[in-house]
Image (spheres, rainbow, N blue to C red):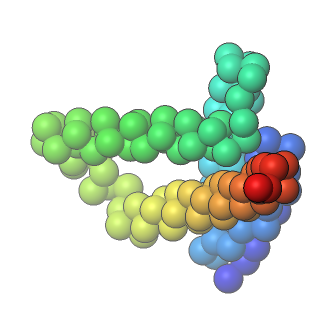
C-alpha cells in the first residue's frame, strides 16, 4: 500500500492509499487545505481544532447533499454506476483517511489544550 505525503494547513501528514490513488489523495488534501485556508481567512480568531471541525462539517454537509440528490435523481444514479464501485471505494477510503488524520490532530490539540489549562488553574 503506497504512502503519500500531503500538507494541510501548513502541516505535513503521511497518508496510506490504494495503489494508483496517490494523485487523487493529493487532490483531496489540496481541496481540504483550500477549505481550511478559506475558513482561516473568514474567521481570524479561531482555534485549530475548531477550524478542522468546521472543515469536516462542511465536507460532511456536501456529501450529505450529494447523497440526497443521488437518491432523488435516477439519471444521477446511472452516472455513478458508470464510475464504478472501485472508484467509489477508493474515494471512501481517501475521505476516511483524511478524516482520521483530522480527528487525530483534533485529539492532540485537545489534549494539549487540556494539559495547558490544567497547568494554569490555581489549586486550592
* Residue 25 appearing in the image: no
The quarter in which the N terminus is drawn is bottom right
Q: In which quarter of the image is residue 114?
A: bottom right
What is the residue that sits farthest to the top in this orientation?
42
The image position of residue 33, as x and y in percent, is 72, 39
Residue 91 locus on image (x, y percent): 49, 59
Report whether 75 appears left or right of 118: left
Q: Residue furthest front?
A: 124
Q: Residue at x 16, y 44 (%)?
A: 71
Count of marks, rendered view: 0
Kindly tell me whether residue 103 is visible in this rendering.
Answer: yes
Of 22 and 39, the residue lying toward us: 39
Q: Which residue is drawn at 68% across and 73% down?
A: 16
Q: Tell me where residue 109 appears, x and y as whole percent.
A: 74, 54
Q: In this view, does 58 lie above or below 22?
A: above
Locate residue 55 relative to residue 61 in the image: left or right.
right
Q: Is residue 69 above or below residue 86?
A: above
Q: Which of 50 and 83 is in front in this view?
A: 50
Left or right relative to 118: residue 110 = left
Amino acid at each position: 500500500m503506497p504512502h503519500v505525503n500531503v500538507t494541510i494547513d501548513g502541516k505535513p501528514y503521511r497518508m496510506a492509499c490504494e495503489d494508483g490513488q496517490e494523485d487523487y489523495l493529493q487532490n483531496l488534501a489540496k481541496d481540504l487545505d483550500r477549505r481550511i485556508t478559506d475558513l482561516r481567512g473568514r474567521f481570524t480568531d479561531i482555534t485549530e481544532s475548531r477550524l478542522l471541525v468546521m472543515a469536516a462539517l462542511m465536507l460532511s454537509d456536501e456529501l450529505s447533499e450529494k447523497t440526497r440528490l443521488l437518491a432523488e435523481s435516477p439519471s444521477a444514479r446511472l452516472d455513478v454506476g458508470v464510475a464504478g464501485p472501485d472508484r467509489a471505494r477508493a474515494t471512501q477510503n481517501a475521505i476516511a483517511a483524511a478524516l482520521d488524520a483530522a480527528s487525530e490532530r483534533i485529539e492532540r490539540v485537545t489534549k494539549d489544550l487540556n494539559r495547558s489549562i490544567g497547568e494554569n488553574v490555581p489549586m486550592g
